[in-house]
Image: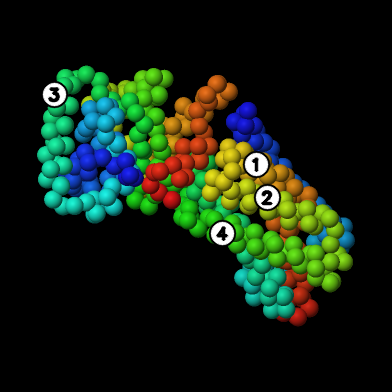
Amino acid sequence: MGQDSSIWTVGIVFYRRHQAQDAVGCILQEARTYPVAVSLGKISLCGPMTASLKNFPLIILPLCLFLSGLLLVVMLVSYPVGECAAPSETLHLADPAFSQRQRPGVLFTHGEHMARTECTDCHHVFADGKNTWEYGMETSCSACHKAGDRGPLGLRRAWHGQCLGCHEEQKGVAGRAPVMCGECHVRGSGTDGP
Amino acid sequence: MIHEFYFLVSGPMTWLGFSVFVAGLAWRLARYRRKAVLANGGLPSDFRPAWAAASITRYLLPLNRTARSSPWSTAAGFALHVPLLTLAFFLSAHVVMVEQSWGVSWPSIPDAWADGLAVLALLGLAFLLGKRLFHPALKGLTEPKDILVLFLVALPLLTGLAAHRQWGDYPTMLTLHILSANILLMVIPFSKLSHMALFFVSRAATGSDFGRRRVGPW
């Protein structure tokens, strides 16, 4: 988090204390837990938050917790359950399952991709060869694909295949999708990692 | 525009590069054998595999007499070769490219090592260039093509380092990196860089010969 870290973010991180040590990269999980918060664009859930936590005056924490809880309740009430609340903004993809991250995480324009493809072009749960994924189901790749697996369904190959699989077919079209390593893993993009 | 060029160099040109590299080196090895047969009227019947292996080993670990008489050049040679081959085969970006294209994978070095290894290799090259230019004896033997191959090896290292650090215009840098590596692959069989394959046969022949003469494997 930079200077723009909001009081709400800290409150949420505190609330989800078990994730505070590595809040970076669990954006997909965060998005699943707080889809409304992300879709409203009020709260940035990207970036390392541990440092800001350490220096935070302890006395404000209960207040943050209360206010952020209140905000969440207001948001959840104002959005009926079942309405599409998938994140329309840029997500920071940096799966915490990669314990020794080699490259920076990826800033992923979820909204732009929603405009171009179906949810089930990426999100998937296969049963009998059919994609049975529906909104509200698992969105974290590492829930099934494992970082230690070097096989075709290992986490790294699953991620790269998911993005490059489509991007490489887009060659030659205007506004061509990124295919080179550093076009997605951008150094100094304000994300974590080397 | 740069992306079309990227697809060209990372696709068809890479296939061409590796094909020329493999076929070219195979041709050089066959030519070496043919010339050896022509010169001696057949392959030596008293070839000493143990001496050949000993000599190759002494050159791969720096345990030979040249390493003792020219320690700096040997150090520069290892500073160039070890990082160069380590990066080529074990850089994560290279492994991921193969992984995505062919579905085979192997372990990679930590990315944090890559920049240091590239700089080490470039320093080794700089030393060898300096020796070519300033060493009294070597200067007289140096031809422009000897300087050129050093630059051809330096180019993929320089552009690879810049692409890895994402200096300059990244898409252009990465495209230049792949282009320069492909050119290097195609030059290897037809230049002194063919020592990549021929070192092993010439060193084996020399080692065997020294073994027959009982002068030690050097």
| B154 displayed left or right of B169 | right
Q: Residues within 10 Å of mark 3 (few under 14, many from 20)?
A: few
Query: Mark 3 — on which chain does it sit?
Result: A
Which sits earlier in the primary sequence, circle 1 or circle 4?
4
Q: Position of residue A94 (x, y in %)?
A: 36, 42
Q: Position of residue B218 (x, y in %)?
A: 71, 76
- Kindly report the distance in space between the C-alpha atoms of the residues bearing marks 3 and 2: 60 Å
- Residues at circles 2 and 1 in contact by the CB criterion of under 8 Å: yes
Q: In the rendered image, is residue A127 in sight?
A: no
Q: With respect to residue B17, does B213 lie above or below?
A: below
Which sits earlier in the primary sequence, circle 2 or circle 4?
4
In the rendered image, residues at marks 3 and 4 fall on the same chain: no
- Kindly report the distance in space between the C-alpha atoms of the residues bearing marks 3 and 4: 56 Å
Label 3: which residue?
A: A77
Q: What's under tag 4, amino acid-wise?
A: Leu
* Numbered disc in front, either 3 or 1: 3
Mark on residue A35? none
* Numbered disc in front, either 3 or 4: 3
Label 2: which residue?
A: B155
Residue B44 vs residue A4, the one in the foreground: A4
Q: What's under tag 3, amino acid-wise?
A: Val
Q: Residues within 10 Å of mark 2 (few under 14, many from 20)?
A: many
Q: In the rendered image, is residue B76 in sight?
A: yes
In the rendered image, residues at marks 1 and 4 fall on the same chain: yes
